[in-house]
Amino acid sequence: MIETVHVPLGERAYDVRIGPGLLERAGAEVAPLLHRPRVWVVTDATVGPLHLDTLRAGLAPQGITLEALTLPAGEATKSWPHFETCVDWLLEQRVERRDIVIALGGGVIGDLVGFAAAVLRRGVRFVQIPTSLLAQVDSSVGGKTGINSVHGKNLIGAFHQPSLVLADTALLGTLPRRDLLAGYGEVVKYGLLGDAAFFDWLEVHGPKLADGDMADRIAAVRRSVEMKAEIVVRDETEQGDRALLNLGHTFCHALEKATGYSDRLLHGEGVAIGCALAFELSSRLGLCSQEAPSRVRAHLKDMGMRCDLADIPGDLPGAEALVDLMGQDKKVLDGKIRFILARGIGDAFVTSEVPCDEVLRLLNDGLTGR
Ligand code: GLY
């Protein structure tokens, strides 16, 4: 039941292994990468107690020992102080250039540990063991690593590809439903940006997948990772096509900043709302039919997900302030905000030619619940 998606990036190529039970057989998976039978694992205070012992036991048959650092759980960990703790710990542990560091956790741990691995001794290898759906389908694959700044999300970082990704789909069973559905926001994104047939499939299989169907979970993770790998191979450092993966993210990053990266809005929830806004904007600009945004919102609602600005609890800043927050996005080019819009479901494209007043109108309508 284990599937493999290869990411063919020349000397930085690696496999993404997908299926249940990978944590239990981590030793067999990781051993070919090791020069000595030791690994250093960085995890967080939620994931560590759930999965660290299983990982330790999974490494033991190959005689591999682990040392672990546990950081606090939550987005606030993706910051300079925790990054410093992580790098200093790896140095104290005398991790060498040829060693392997393991990121065991969701997107926060994967991004932070990947960045630590990128700069430690000018680059050590690392393995991603993503434990959330969001990390399995998106953040663990493709080599984007980094931390947040007071100026915005993910503004400090490096491209550093992992040497292996172990996406153990059995671990998704320990996720709270809200986190699982937030990760599903990224799954839907892949269908919307480039595979209409996958979106059709999700409309049928999404509810079963959310309720725990393992075959559907594996299929959704595999297709998402395949699509991500294809795009990353075409454009590893986001000079062009890779920006498609940011469908919904220009809106999402502004909303996350406006809600203080808090529990009010999880990243994947922001992506889902952002995708719905991107399709609504595309329709208003005459790029796609009105049916497309209706279908996007209908599927998100069917899954029990948030899809409107009005679904975010508490106050939001006005439309102009939100557009201002979008201006800090990494996708800004020559002062123009780049949007990912769509000609239809499965047909997204990147553009900087979006009239600002149309974006303001869209946000105003959303904020006033129209
Ligand atoms: N999460 C978007 C990317 O990896 O490019």
Image: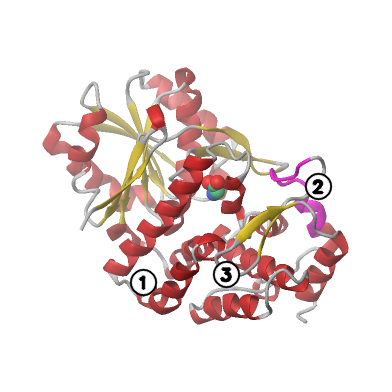
Give the mark nearer the N terminus: 1 vs 2.
1
Which residue matches tag 3?
345
Residue 54 or residue 241, whichever sits in front? 241
- Cβ atoms at labels 3 and 2 below 8 Å apart: no
- Residue 19, above or below 269: above
Q: Amino acid at mark 1?
A: Leu
Q: Dot 2 lies on which element? A: loop
Q: How many marks?
A: 3
Circle 3 sits in a helix, a strand or a loop, which is it? Answer: loop
Instruction: Give the side of residue 342 with respect to residue 4, left or right.
Output: right
Q: Return the residue at label 2.
A: 336
- Which is more foreground, mark 3 or mark 1? 3
The amino acid on which the numbered mark 2 sits, given as a three-letter code, is Lys
Dot 3 or dot 1, earlier in sequence: 1
Extent of the magenta region: 322-333
Residue 123 vertical placement versus 258 (above, below): above
